Image (cartoon, rainbow, N blue to C red):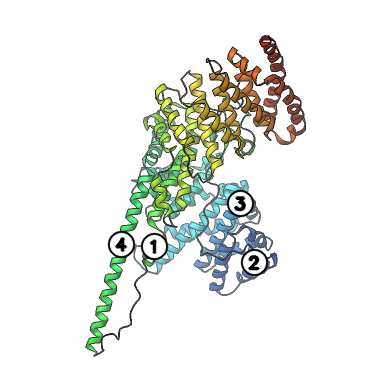
Amino acid sequence: MIMGKSRARKFKPPSFSPTVAAKKQPDRSGDTEDDKNVDAEELLQNLQSPSAEVREFACASISTLVQQKQVIPAFLQRDAVRCLGPLLLDKCLSVRETAAGALRNLSTCGGYDVCDDMVTRDIMTPLVALLKECTTGLDANMEPTINTKDLSKKCVEDIAIQAINVLWNVCESSSTALTIFNKENCVEIVLQCLSKFPNNMELAISAAYCLQTVTEDNPELLASFDANSLKTLESVLLSPAGNMEMRHLQTLVGGAVWNLKEKIPSSSQADTINAILRILAEVLSVDSGVFIAEMKETETQHLSASAAEAETEEAAAILEEATLNEENGMVDGAIKEKKPNDISDFIPPANEEVRQVSALLVAQRTALEMIVNMCCSEDPSDDEWEAMSSSDESEMCIENSVTNIGGQLLTPLCLSDEVHSALLNHTIPKKVFEKTAFPSSSAVEICKQASAWKPLIAKMYTVQLRALTCLHNILSMLDIEDLGGASALQELALHLSGVVFTQSDIPKKDDFLEAASSAVRALLQTMASKGIPQCMTPEQIISLGEACAQSSHTSARVNAVSIIGITGSVLAKADSTVDILKSIGNFLLGVATNDSSLVVSGAALDAIFDVYADGEVAEKAAVEIKLLQNLKKIQPAFKTKIRKEGKEKYSMDQLCVLDNVRTNLRRFIPYLENVEKKFKP
């Protein structure tokens, strides 16, 4: 038995909306507590000013300040939520918008605890009232001309964007907020905002994020969804995708529809699942490296055209002024020389090309997360989510399991015929394999050259990480024939070797090792179970194991010993492998002795049992590395550590597995004693 066989990982929707963009403020990390308190006190007092401009400025200042987490307590201690809440219904629309923006940033930067506190302080009452008022403005039937009413409508939509993001954040964090959401039928408001996608994509995407969150594990909401509601979602899915923001929106809505699949009539289930996976396949088919190059070229052309147009306009203005001066008898040189235009003046505040690339990368990440979740059971409760996240020590609690995005480890399930067929019909496995490659070096170089493009680099690497995790689940769930047979798996092994052993400037090395080792582990398990020869050399496997053993992620270290154990079990059945088996044994003994986590130590011992349990070659290697003597030293320390740390640090599932390891260790030692006798002269 190998502890902690591959498990599917499930991903949650993004926890919080992005913050509202604000002008850069000076770093206040050196401010004293008194400085922060004075600022908070003064700004909160200004919220009560009779002047709308003062109230708006105070809200905007708070919105900026709370993006620095160390400032947030000073505002919460002065009941900022109750001060800002009434301004959501201020008679001045611009104050409403900035107040909602401040609450959005407070909820985003403050995290779960702050969101929960906001709900406790009754933010939902003015928030729901504001959103209901917004729906009236959104419903207004106005002609698309520039007039006061249209400006008011645009302002209402801007307010709705901020308010929907606050709603998303608090519903993600608070069951009370979700209950109020259901009771007040806020889903109608969200759907109305979503329906504005032809004219206001930002509002629609915010609504889609919110909808994806509130539809997850919310049976009460499912009951309120009717045919018209589903029709709204269908209209988004069936609309032509003219740009990447539309693809991003469709991917998010696809996630919400997946959450709502129980509401879809059984006769339509196959068509719906097929439509969702078609959208995911289309998103994943786009080569982000090529798209980045195209968008950069488009941006360059736009900037050149803007600069040329500006120069033409300036030349015309100069000529006109010179003509007037000449007519008025002014001498040459009387015209004041103008400075050449700064080309940065022509860059739009929101870079359209960067926005489209960002939308593609986020859509691809979301698509991969959805595919991962399709391969997972949806039974675990929220408590199990916390207990089984990838950041804690649960990688080995349950055998024969699969993984989901966000880190939840779950028991695998048989894919439904509809999902299985759609995955294969849209060649999803192939598309996932392609995304596991490193981002295009030329695309990374393009993004490094401009500050507005640099954040895209991290997004590219995130797509790769999600693809590696997705690959792990696909390998765990699909038959070898579905994956293309033995030759396809060997080709994949060569590809993963290139990914894992290529030196690259990876932003988050530990995250990469965790995802990559997870994929390699699932692949080696699949190949070993079917007797398919491995393409990675033992030296490469040990090198990967040594790298993962240094990771701060427990699951990466568990993956390391599992990969080494799988390789060792295969080599133990071959001839002339004593030397490499000795290296493997020394590595596993080192981990079993020195790792701080009992989970990892237990996995290393379990791998030792598998590698050295049978076969003359393995027995010879065991004797030469003094495996018996080393395990006798480990045994009492392992037993004592379980007794001292067990109940305090580990779950019942983990303790059951660790107890099983302890029992197997007690039985394995007599076996090794017989081996020693066998090899004595």
Identify the mark at residue 304; answer none if there is no mark.
Answer: 4
Q: Residues within 10 Å of mark 1 (few under 14, many from 20)?
A: few
Q: Amino acid at mark 4?
A: Ser
Q: State how far apart marks 4 and 3 are (Cα).
A: 43 Å
Question: Secondary structure under badge 3?
Answer: helix
Is any atom of residue 228 visible in this view?
Answer: no
Residue at 54%, 37% in the rendered image: 513
User: Which residue is label 2 attached to?
Assistant: 40
Q: Residues within 10 Å of mark 2 (few under 14, many from 20)?
A: many
Q: Amino acid at mark 2?
A: Ala
Question: Secondary structure under badge 2?
Answer: helix
Q: Earlier in the sequence, mark 4 or mark 3?
A: 3
Left/right of residue 103 with respect to residue 448 in the rendered view = right
x and y percent of residue 82 in the render? 64, 62
Residue at 58%, 51% in the rendered image: 170
Q: Earlier in the sequence, mark 1 or mark 2?
A: 2
Left/right of residue 35 with respect to residue 330 in the rendered view = right
Q: Amino acid at mark 1?
A: Pro
Is any atom of residue 405 visible in this view?
Answer: yes
Question: Secondary structure under badge 1?
Answer: loop
Mark 4, mark 3: which one is toward the viewer?
Answer: 4
Please report contact status of discs 1 and 3: CB closer than 8 Å, yes or no.
Answer: no
x and y percent of residue 677 in the render? 70, 10
User: Which residue is label 3 attached to?
Assistant: 111
Q: State how far apart marks 1 and 2 are (Cα).
A: 33 Å
Query: Which quadrant is the C terminus positioned in?
Result: top right
Mark 1, mark 4: which one is toward the viewer?
Answer: 4
Please report contact status of discs 3 and 2: CB closer than 8 Å, yes or no.
Answer: no
